[in-house]
Image (spheres, rainbow, N blue to C red):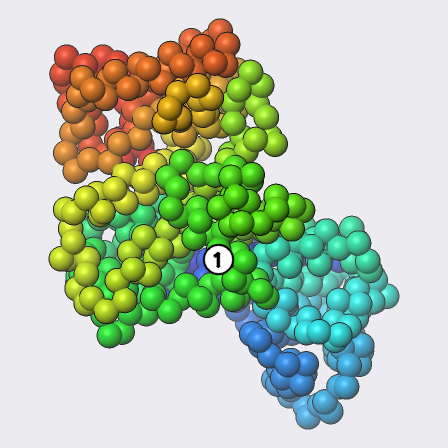
Amino acid sequence: MDKLIGREQEIKLLKEYTKSERPEFVAIYGRRRVGKTFLVNRLFAGKMSFSITGVLDGSMDEQMEAFIDAMQEYSGELVEKPRTWMEAFRVLKVFLKKKVVLKQRCIVFFDELPSMDTQRSGFIRALGYFWNSWASLQDNLTLIVCGSATSWMIRHIVDDKGGLHDRITHEMHLRPFTLRETERYMKSRGFKWERLSVMQAYMALGGIPYYLSLLNREESFAINIDRLFFSEDEELRREYKRLYRTLFKSPDSYTAIVSALSKVRSGLTRNELSRVLGKDSSGSLSKKLEDLVNCDIIRKYVVRERNVKKNSAIYQLTDFYSLFYLTFVAKAETETGYWCNHIGTSEVNAWLGLSFERLCMAHVAQIKQALRIDRIATKFYSWRSKSTNPKAQIDMILERADGIINIFEMKYSEAEYMLSKEEEEKLRSRVSKFREETGVKEALWPTLVTTYGLKNGIHSSSFVATLTTDDLFL
């Protein structure tokens, strides 16, 4: 069985929460397949007083069946089926009363919590009553609730306005692996891939442990991709619908947003998205965008004009799996061996360039560390010109408290990158336009992030600093 890789901070915190001298109510949320359940189950294996997993798309009756199974497993006794969640939590309280009097910490785990909240089930009210009336008074009890439907977890548990208002003692957003954690995970499974292959795997699958677990160390990256997406087995082709169905009860409107963002490299503002989708730029669209941000599917970037304006933010698709699926898989319905047959094509090269940019933006902390500015306060934003046609854009800018602004160029290359005269002129033009339109007075430092570094040439001095793939693995 896989061992825990990474998650050092999360492990440290969870251990603290189960050693405190007060009742703890911990909410863990994050994208499907990111490893929430695995983390809790492995960390507290053999130490739980009670654990239950909700039935995905299950009815109220099926959720109660799951409760009975869990209660009988932990109590070793036959349990009569409760009619309501109030009755179920009453049964749980009677069972746990025998545990909390012992010296050992009482750990209770509710996994896939959103599935239990079926229509008109009264689950949230019953959970709130259970915590407020009894569990919150038990100094050696830790209640951990977990769910992939991140927006549901935030609205109904973390930010609940009813019985659970301000009752959560700790929340934990479990995010995808970084490149470094991905490399460690793959090495633990016997992979001997070079970092370029690890990076390509990340650009297609993201730092999602379950997806990475499907890779075969005996196969190349390309053959793995064909097996997972373009073969008879194609385990990850069907994952797309499952992902969004797990995250959202009505996924179609969300996948429409994701699909629209996948087609625009530079991203879209809310008003632009509204026009593309043919819908009003209303609160409903804002809510859906917020949900997708919370689920680590898209990212919201503020845009630098004379001031950083949040209401003119750009939304970009940052979920690597969704970007890969919509770019290639959704369009190659029947072609087996698609990936090996299309290596080197303009479509694949364009994806490599775009995905590498997203990779860099997902590793800002590592970039700051490589530049030795991780202790300097920074603002991270994008910029769009309002005067050029087509609109010039800089996707990644770090404005530093020491009076310097790093303007990033992110270039994927399978050899040392050579800056051409044409690219140098474009870079110079973007930097000039940025200063002119924003009116910034700070020093502007063009900074390159590329795979194998910058090849010396007559234009290479355009960059003040150059980072490589290895820096992203810090």
Q: Secondary structure at mark 1?
A: helix
Q: In the rendered image, which quarter is residue 112 located in?
A: bottom right
Res 115 visible? yes
> Which is more toward the observer, 81 or 250?
250
Residue 125, horizontal then vertical, whole percent: 80, 67
- Residue 278 to residue 219: above or below: above
23 displayed left or right of 43 = right
Res 51 visible? no
Q: Residue at x 73, y 91 (%)?
A: 80
Disc 1 target residue: 255
Q: Amino acid at mark 1?
A: Thr
Q: How many marks?
A: 1
Q: Residue at x 80, y 77 (%)?
A: 86
Q: Residue at x 75, y 74 (%)?
A: 120
- Residue 19 to residue 471: above or below: below
Residue 467, horizontal then vertical, whole percent: 29, 27
Q: Quadrant of the C terminus?
A: top left
What residue occupies the far top of the structure in this picture?
A: 441
- Residue 64 to residue 416: above or below: below
> Which is more toward the observer, 67 or 30?
30
Residue 257, horizontal then vertical, whole percent: 49, 51
86 displayed left or right of 325 = right
Q: For the residue carrying disc 1, how many other residues have a C-alpha within 10 Å: few (<14), some (14-19), or many (20+)? A: some
Q: Residue at x 16, y 29 (%)?
A: 416
- Residue 296 to residue 404: above or below: below
Q: In the rendered image, which quarter is residue 2 located in?
A: bottom left
Residue 214, horizontal then vertical, whole percent: 31, 65
